[in-house]
Image: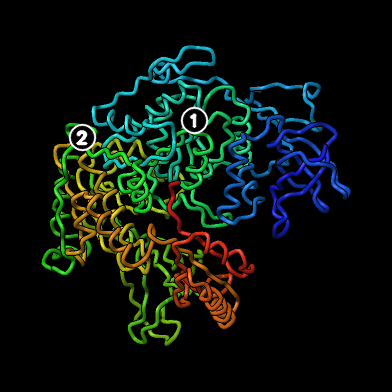
Amino acid sequence: MYVEVILGKAVGKGASFLTYFSSLPLEPGTIVEVPLMRGKAPAVVFKKVAQPDFSCKEIIRVLYSKPLPKHLLKTAIWMSEYYAAPLSSIIGMVLPNGVLKQRRKAKTEQTEQIVSRKQLPFLGPCRSLPSPRGSRTSPRAAALRIPSKGQTASAGDIPLNPHQKQALEGLQKGSGGTKLLLGVTGSGKTNIYLKMASDALLAQKSVVLLVPEIALTGQLVTVFKDTFGEIVTVIHSKQTEVERQRIFDSLLYKNEPRIVIGPRSALFAPLDDLGLVIIDEEHESTYYQENTPKYSAIRVASKMVDILKCPCILGSATPAIEDFYLAKKRDSLVILSEKAKNTAIKPEVSIVDFKNRDEFSRNRYFSNSLLKAITNNLESGRQSLIFHNRRGSSPLTICEDCGEELLCPTCFLPLTLHVDKYEMQCHTCGYKCRVPSACPKCGGSSLIHKGFGTKLLESELCRLFPKARIKRFDADTKKGEGLDETYSSVRDGEVDILVGTQTLAKGLDLPLLSTVGIVQADAGLSLPDFSAEERVFQLITQVMGRVGRGHLDKAEVFIQTFRPEHPVLSFAINEDYLGFSEYLLKARKKSGFPPFLFVAKVAVTMKTEASTLKKIREAARKFSSDKRLLISPPMPAFHERTARGFTWEIVVRSNSRKALLENFANLDTNFHASLDLPSLL
């Protein structure tokens, strides 16, 4: 038979499909190895075709005896059309890395499905799939009594309060589709996830739970593992190529429903019985893939469940404004506004004006009232959390004599001082150098370091509270000492003061945490980005949600800011997402940004600035001829200079997505474009 296959490896523009022949029949979705030029490549059978009028090569071997689930193939084809991305790059993302490699089975592996070659009408050997030996079932998982095929399903033992039950009923209305669960921090969204997952398993359906980053959501993973036991499979970036491939194998050949937890790539787990997709903290930017193929995991999940006719639940206390707008418009919004525990309390919020220096008489970074609260917590055995979304010691080094800034030689961005390593670092490209003793321009010795990061805050706290147990959590935390590895000790009170960036803002439930201090709440409001206000609101709301969860009788939040009158801070302090969404939607409509217009960013990167300017101006002239488009003037990108060269960009807006794609289809390879699109179907 002759088949058209989708290559899992890019070989040129538009060359995703090739025709091969096989001496035996192959089903669509079968993963095979094919000859390609002078090498070999993985591919997926797309469809049977008539014998062409040109000669074809023969498929080398079949890699898996079981085809990919049909919904994955349909989703991949849709993604290629919707995002104007090469289909081969999408299939390459679905298949595990190193899929062509012959691997020895680990000694502890058992085979879930044993199929001899004589039983298979295929060309090559099939893989045998590992299954954990000595599987254990947790007591709660045993209580759930998830049935095997042929057994009678029984009710899952997931307790819900009346507000959660009402929200669950709203999410279960209809036969499927994407719905948004807007639940305030501490409202018990996790319990609703558990109940819906339990119901799906009882119906013999598998579940995918997407999380922003595994490192930030270890607590959620623990809850699911404690509840459902060994049927939970976790995917994360720290796994080796071999581990990821074995997980792929075990899911493809599984014989019972599974729960798969992981970042956006977990959405492409080969589950042929997928019945529920849950996306936690759906507002997080990590659900959008920046490199090719660029896609939104939320948008893809919405399409996938549309194909499968099953539900997709987006959960957040601060959902993306585009998703909120569309969910409200389509009557797919469910609000959970009550805290899960009756003992939960509203934190006492104090706004401290950074310009009032009387409030900072003891320390330039921490207000007197915040220091007093930390002191009281140390005396009573309670914890304090200090949040500042900037790592390092000082983000700016400048010469007082000539005004020269120390910039990264690659990116032209300010270098950040790290006092503990006594070096300067670029947080964009990774460049590092020793701290200079003199100005590289004028030779003067008056170098001063401005601003502050989490490392400087940690050292100040160590000086102020020498007997306190202080721990910093950010991207510079040593391997093995991160929050996911030390969560149990932090939860049990072995740390008195936590200092960190957004690592500490999401999903934490610390029973001894009494005080939160946000050192500079307005730090992101001045960024040149239409979504800056939204991100600041989300971060403040998420950090505030770490206290007042019902463990203690007192919860305090100190918000230090240079702009105490800013409306975003007012909305965040009152946990008023509905008011904030109304404020932001008015501003977005007036200025012409999503969800009211589609927005694309078209950038060009070349070796010299002159050639970059020439190319981006050429693109601006070309787009200006289409009256359906609104074009911004060419401007330098936020990261204007990198190792690849200079980057300039234009912002293109339109109320027609089709108009954007039509214009982008003719861009040459020097350009790269990204679309900011609403996530829901």
Report if residue 452 is visible in the image.
Answer: no
Does 389 appear above or below 250?
A: below
Q: Nearer the viewer's eye, disc 2 or disc 1?
A: 1
The crowd level at tag 2 (other Cα within 10 Å; few <14, some 14-19, many 20+) is: some
For residue 376, above or below residue 110: below
- Mark 1 nearby-residue class (10 Å; few <14, some 14–19, many ≥20): many
Quadrant containing the N terminus in the rendered view: top right
* Residue 526 in the image, given as x and y percentages of width and height: 31, 68
Tell whether 552 sits left or right of 44.
left
Q: Left or right: where does residue 464 sit relative to residue 434? A: left
Give how far across and how far down residue 391 sits, in percent.
37, 59
> SS of the residue at dot 1?
strand
Residue on which the image places disc 2 = 551
At label 1, the amino acid type is Gly
Give 165 or 226, whichever is nearer the viewer: 165
Q: Nearer the viewer, residue 397 or 633?
A: 633
The one nearer the camera, 21 or 413, is 21
> In the image, what residue type sits under mark 2?
His
- Which residue is under mark 1? 275
Question: Residue 394 shows which numbered tag?
Answer: none
- Seen from the viewer's position, the closer of residues 458 and 290 is 290
State how many labels appear.
Answer: 2
**Residue 585 percent location from the top left of the image:** 30, 58
* Residue at the farthest front position: 627
Q: Dividing the picture into quarters, in which one does residue 560 lie?
A: bottom left
